[in-house]
Structures are given as structure tokens and as C-alpha cells.
Amino acid sequence: MKIILDVMGGDKDVAEFVKGAVMAKAEYGEDVVLVGDEAKIREILSQENAEDGFTVVNAPDVITMEDNPLSIRREHRACSMATALRMVAGGEGDAVVSAGNTGALFIGATGFVHCAEGVRRAALASVIPMEKPLLLLDCGANAEVTPEFLVQFAHLGSIYMNRVMGVENPRVGLLNNGAEAHKGTPIYKEAHALLAKEEGIHFVGNIEGKDVPFDKCDVLVCDGFAGNILLKTIEGTSKFVLKQFSGIFSGVLGKLAGAMVLKKAKGLKQRFDAKEYGGAPFLGIAKPVIKAHGNSDAKAIKNAIRQAIAYAKTGVIAEIEALAAGQPAQ
């Protein structure tokens, strides 16, 4: 298997991406193609004593977080992200990992790689470590949706949670401002009605924000605007709570009294650490495309590559296409 890694565009230096690739190759044994500024990449590979283990593709142009996402199809058509996407679209790799501009990656994935056959709109999905792992989609790709898109997101998320996370008959919830079926905007009301009668979906109704952490569903669908706010609120809240834990048990006596609690808190911090999950897949794209966190370090990149490998091996995309065609997957 061959994973194509865009080493440009994230918040961290290129060195973190290359080191993450070296770690991933050593741990998972799969090939990783490095796309970006070749001179910088080879310098870091030399420092890591890994010059002979990687293919490097020179694409020094970068689309930054501040660039218009549409520029990936215009002035930045030759950037590292676009090059990586075109390579996987052309069969030169099995999956793409990038920590760059989310909007540009979505536009590039749909424009260069295209949606899987029968999929109307792809979605960015993220596993959230709640009481049980929860898949949230969309969490940033589609600020505006239709009820039909939300229904398709439910199918995409159900397949992913079943095939990748091993959840039998995943429960699907619709993020809303009330549990009652009549709550929400017209789009959400119609989506609720459609999901309630959709075959192949284990729909459990509306899920309020306060119930998200408590195992009410396995897949939570919403538009990308609400989903992104929810995701970042959860990230910020977890950091705040863990910081408060540290403050409570400061000082010698506090440290002695709270040793066990701090040990538990460290485990909790690891559980909520985005580095452990690596990245979020764009579900519905014809080839696996993984969006790593913009602030990814070497460990996060290694885990994003792990996720790309797992996604590519599961056959999720074939099952999505079979569902869209109305036929059972082979």
C-alpha cells in the first residue's frame, strides 16, 4: 500500500511531517510518498537516516490557511496538496493525508479525485472520544446542506462506523436544539422526517448538544457549520477542564493528595488528544482523503497515516458505491 503525504500547509514545520512519515513506515510497514519542497524533505530524511526509504515528489508551492480555498483550482494548481490529490486520482497511491487548508482540501478532493459514484455530497467526519467513540459529520466541509444531504451523511457515517470502528447497527442521531421531532429549522425538520423512514438507517431521533457526550448515538449528523462549532467547543472545553485539574492539585500537599486523580487526568488528556486520532476522513470521496489537524506534530501525522491505511483496507468506498447504486456490496 502507498500513502501520499502532503508535507506543506500545516501549522508545523515540514520536519514534523517527515518525521511522522518515518515513524509510520517503521511501525506500519507501508510506503509513504512525500510531496512538497524536495530540498527540505531530503535534508530532513538525511537527518533521520532515512534517505533510501521514501519517494519524494517536488511540489514547493503551498496553499496556506489564509488562501481562498478555490485557489487550489486556480493559482495554486501545482501546490503540494493539489499534486498529492492528482496523484491518488491517477492511481499513483491508495490514499492522501494532508494537514492543510480544509476548504481547499475539500474542493481539491471533489474536483480532482471526485465523489464516489452515486454520492451527491461528501462530508468531513471526525471521531470524538466521548463515553463511546462518536462519529460527527459534517464537521466543516458543507456549511449549507439539504435534508437529502443529511440522509446521505447518515448512510456514510453508518458504513464507516460499522466497517472501520466495528460498531454493529450504528445508531444515528440528528444534532438539533431539542429532542422533539418538530424542533429545528425547516431543513432539520424535513431531515428528521426522511431519516425516520429511511431503510438501512438505525435512526434514534434528535440529539441535543447536552446529550452528545453520553452515548445517545454512534453517528451524529448535521451541517458543517454547526458541526465545526460543536467539534471545536468540545476540544476547547476538554482543554479547559484538564487545565483546571492541574490547578486544583498544585502545590506539594495538593500533589500528594491528588496523585491518583492526576494519573487519571493524564489518561483523560490522552483520550481527548487529537494527536491520538490523527485526522478526519472525507467520506464519499472516490479515494481515501484524510484531513489531519492543522497543528499536527509527528505523532499526529503518524496516526493520520495509520488511519489512512485502515480506511483504504476496509472496502468502505466500495460499500458506499454499492449502497448508492442500490446493490449489495461484494
Image: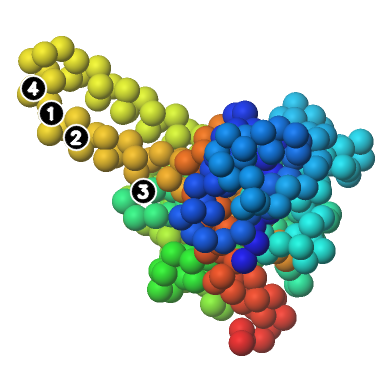
| Amino acid carrying mark 3 in the image | Met
Q: Residues at badges 1 and 4 in contact (C-beta under 8 Å)?
A: yes
Location of mark 4 (residue): 256
Q: Say what secondary structure mark 1 lies in.
A: helix
Q: CA distance from mark 4 to mark 3?
A: 29 Å
First along the sequence among labels 4 and 3: 3
Q: CA distance from mark 3 to mark 2?
A: 19 Å
| Image quadrant containing the C terminus | bottom right
Q: Position of residue 31 (x, y in %)?
A: 61, 59
Location of mark 3 (residue): 130
Residue at 25% in and 22% down: 246
Relative depth, front residue between 125 and 9: 9
Name, please, the residue furthest toward the right: 74
Name, please, the residue furthest toward the top: 251
- Residue 196 can be seen, yes or no: no
First along the sequence among labels 4 and 2: 4
Q: Is residue 127 left or right of residue 115?
A: left
Location of mark 1 (residue): 259
Location of mark 2 (residue): 263
Residue 148 higher or lower than 144, as above or below: below
Residue at 12% in and 28% down: 259
Q: Tell me if mark 3 has few (under 14), some (14-19) or many (20+) residues whose alpha carbon lies within 10 angstroms of its own.
A: some
